[in-house]
Image: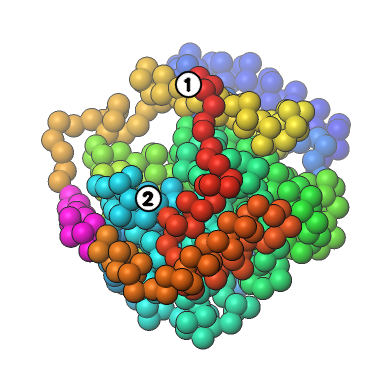
Amino acid sequence: MYDRKKLAGIATRRKKWQDEELASNHRKSPARLERFSTVSDEEIDLLYTPDPLSNFDYEEDLGNPGQYPYTRGVQPTMYRGRLWTMRQFAGFGSAEDTNSRFKFLLSQGQTGLSTAFHFPTLMGYDSDSPRAKGEVGMCGVAVDSLKDMEILFAGIPLDKVTTSMTINGPAAMIFAMYLAVAEKQGVPFHKVGGTIQNDILKEYIAQHSWIFPPEPSMRIITDILAYCADNVPRWNTISISGYHIREAGSTAVQELAFTIADGIAYVQAGIDAGIPVDRFAPRLSYFFNAHMDFFEEIAKYRAARRMWARIMRERFHAKDENSWKLRFHTQTAGCTLTAQQPMNNVVRVALQALSGVLGGTQSLHTNSMDETMALPTEQSVTVALRTQQIIAEESGVANTIDPLGGSFFVEQLTNGMEEKAMEYIRKIDEMGGMVAAIRQGYPQREVADAAFHFQRLVDAGKKRIVGLNAYTSEEGVPIPLLKIDDRVERQQVARTKEVRRKRDAKKARATLAALKEGSLTPSVNLMPLLLDAARGYVTLGEMCDTLRETMGVYTDPAIF
């Protein structure tokens, strides 16, 4: 960008300015903080100039939108051609309750569905399991069988709406039920579009809703990759998620590094399973957190695109340009919401959403102001959706592509983010890859240490959170909260028992026997067997229990 002589002159003048004018000004008006740093506690300089960018190459480091290395965006026209998908997370109570919320959101201008399942479903248990008692419908929707999935998407054409489903351990079983609903609607699989999260590695690192150990879990994932490549070509088979890693307390660099390392592990697993990389890599997507440090987040998204493009082209020798493109969904940071002064959360979410848009996200979920206390009410989720719509229609930020590209500050943040994330990836490679690193507890410890460090900064008042440790007030502001009625559990348990009673018992037993036998034969793809079981109204818990017998159950290592 600049020749070395010019850069040297800029650096000299900057030092003189710091030593003379700035020092004089600081005596009159001292800095308000001893140290300025990002949310991740990365130190921020007073001023950014071009001198550290002496080796910066526009074509190699930025390029044009829609062209390698995609730092500026994966589509040539970005939001001038099409806005990001507004995909609000929804799921609570019964399938009927969530179906009503889906239809409400679509009527308000939402452009894609995103499904939250309750914890028993996430862990592979039916609602009538003793382990589910008191949890049914509380933090997501209860889905035990094809019957629930039919109700969940009643009146919603699956060839017209894309659906994202946040499910990991039992992702294959839920996906099979979704495909069975599409069949019943008369929708061919090649017209079905959407995403399953299906990212089991980050569960071991952060969220802890797992079922099976890593090796059999990776086998299920590669079965999904192969099945979708042949039968469901519009489906995003894995949403490689940094979101939950960040929610667990990681820094932005750790979120970026561990998420990309997870992606590397999935690509390698697919290749090792005999699937050509360009058959499945274009349908991998990513899911990132939008935290509070505005510029740090934007740099993270830009660095992620560039890193993935280089990794896919240089490490895995992918030839299809679509394999190089990192497409990602963003969700604003739930961990930043406060129960104190909850109206402040509207402002936090707006800033976080704006960082996602300026970072070039393909879809976005904005949290509701009440989500730190309960599932969102209809009113609060409408405000969250309107936040996206105001950004899209009124702010002007969607009128040009990567408007912060070329900023000395943003480019140096982006470069630094990539360098530090690649250091983590090299260390994970030395350990034998992400599965081996997880077995050793490495990413888990790193995240725990970062979370502890941040909490100490908050407790000491060095990181200020409005309403929590700064500008506090004694009086709370009451807001209405969504309550889940006890009837949900009673009705859900009754429906699941009725499904078992009315189905063809002989067929159900046969499909489970076939699933068990198939799981013992590595060359057998489990997806057709799971689809047969779903069609026969075999429950989620029954499918998972069958595989628990043959695959085992994961136990977290004692690492702390």
| Residue density around tag 2, few if under 14, some if 14–19, many if 20 or more, within 10 Å | many
Magenta span: chief secondary structure:
loop
Q: Dividing the picture into quarters, in which one does residue 16 lie?
A: top right
Q: Which residue is mark 2?
A: 120
Q: Is residue 335 left or right of residue 72?
A: left
What secondary structure is marked by label 2? helix
Name the image quarter holding residue 513.
bottom right
Q: Nearer the viewer, residue 326 or 19?
A: 326
Q: Is residue 548 visible?
A: yes
Whole-percent x, y for residue 72 in the image? 68, 55
Upstream in the sequence, badge 2 or badge 1? 2
Q: What's drawn in magenta, residue-wise?
A: 479-491
User: Residue 335, how many percent across, how many down?
Assistant: 39, 39
Residue matched to label 1: 453
- Is 489 colored magenta in this rendering? yes
| Residue at image point 59% right, 26% down | 441
Q: Secondary structure at mark 1?
A: helix
Of all residues, the one furthest to the top in this rendering is: 27
Q: Position of residue 523 (x, y in %)?
A: 74, 57
- Please give the name of the residue rendered at 26% of the width and 39% of the height, measured from the top-left corner: 339
